[in-house]
Each structure stands twice: as structure tokens, then as C-alpha cells.
Amino acid sequence: MALNNDTRIDQETDVISEKEISQKESKMKIKSFLLDLLFYAVLIFVCIYILPNYVIQRTIVDGSSMADTLQNGENLYVEKISYRFDRLDRFDIIVFYPYGRENEEYYVKRIIGLPGETIQIIGEDIYINGEILEEDYGKEPIQDPGRAKDPITLGEDEYFVMGDNRNISKDSRDEYVGNVAKENIGGKVIFRITPFSRFGTVD
């Protein structure tokens, strides 16, 4: 039986429609693949570069200058946002580069003096703007005030830091460390990862 022209046109239209649908599906699959690829590329970039450089980073305690609060070999998480927005408070524990960021050596200490304050150590007491600082973080009474035997006035972007193990800590009392500039702060300690027996937030 012969097909009329209308029947042929309908068949050709059906074939063209199937091809168009197939091409559209293929394009959608390629587009979906490229979007997935872009998503994972961005995710990897964020995890490898953005997070450790600008948000959070793991660090390890080296030494006992922060005992008993922190112990040698403990793994910590450090958040790197607070100091950028001037949200560091007295008694926060920070990571900083005492000899500048071009030097890889870093210290972990506690903030004692804030920008603009005057610090002095007389005997076993720490004075802030002429008033005794009430705190109980020090493991032992201070034996050596170092450069803080005389009043030290901090600049608008400077901090005075000390280790909790005051008598073995190399900190802002030492002339080679001195006041800590904001630009040399790496972040604020927020969490202890290991050992698991001490897992949790850090005060």
C-alpha cells in the first residue's frame, strides 16, 4: 500500500523530533557533567586553599610553655577570622609569628594586654592601666617580669601575650618577642582534637 505525502511528512517529523530530543538530552548531560566538575573543583579549592589560609587550620603544640592548659604534642584547631575583625579578647589563646610571617616559627600564647593598654609586672602581679589584673591562668607565680618591669604601652594594633607556664615561657616579656602586632597573628585557638581524653574546646 502506497504512503501519501502527509504520512511521509509525519514520519520524517517524528524522526527529526527524536534526533532533537536525543541531542538535547546529550547537551543536558554534558552541561550537568561540566557543572559537577566545576562544583568539585571549587570545593577542592576551598578545602585546600581557602579554609586553611583564611578560615580554620590545624596546629600542634610544641613545648610546655602553655601547661597546664595545653600540653606538648596536642593537636588544635585555630580559627583565622576573629583577629581580622578585631574580635580578640583578653585571655584568648592565639597562634602568632614572633619573628614575622616570613619566618615559619610560631608560638601559642595567651593574650594578657589589649591594644592601647599599659602593662606592667610588679612582683608576682600583672597591672593593666595601673590596676591589678584578676586572673588565675598562670601555673606558678611570676619570677621574671622581663621588659614588663617597666610600663609598656601597646600600640593600636599590638597585644601583650604570655604563656600559662609563666616561668619557662618565652613571650612578650622577652625583648626578642616583644609586643605582638596584629599582622603577625595567625589565629585564635578554639578546639583541641587530640589527645581524645582532652578532646573539646579550649579556655
Image: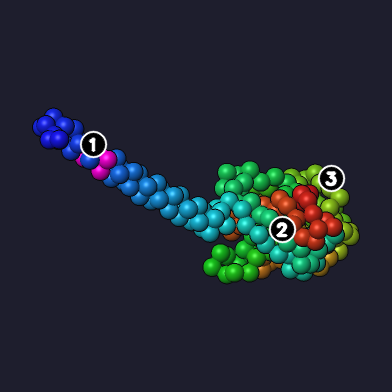
Return the residue nearer the eye: 143 or 100: 100
Q: Secondary structure at mark 3?
A: loop
Give the number of the mark in front: 1 or 3. 1
3D distance between C-alphas at marks 1 and 2: 65 Å
Kind of residue indicated by mark 1? Asp
Q: Could you say which disc has been placed on residue 134 in the image? A: 3
Q: Name above or below for residue 86 compared with residue 171.
A: above
**Could you tell me if residue 7 is visible in this image?**
yes
Estimate the x, y position of residue 65 in percent, counting from the top left.
79, 65
Q: Main secondary structure of the magenta part?
A: helix
The mark found on residue 76 in the picture is: 2
Choose between 155 and 186: the one closer to the eye: 186
Residue tagged 1: 14
Helix, strand or loop at label 1? It is helix
In 3D space, how far apart are the residues under numbered discs 2 and 3 (Cα atoms)?
27 Å
Residue contact at pointers 1 and 2, CB within 8 angstroms = no
Q: Earlier in the sequence, mark 1 or mark 3?
A: 1
Quick one: 64 or 134, which is closer to the camera?
A: 64
| Type of amino acid at the residue the image marks with label 3 | Glu
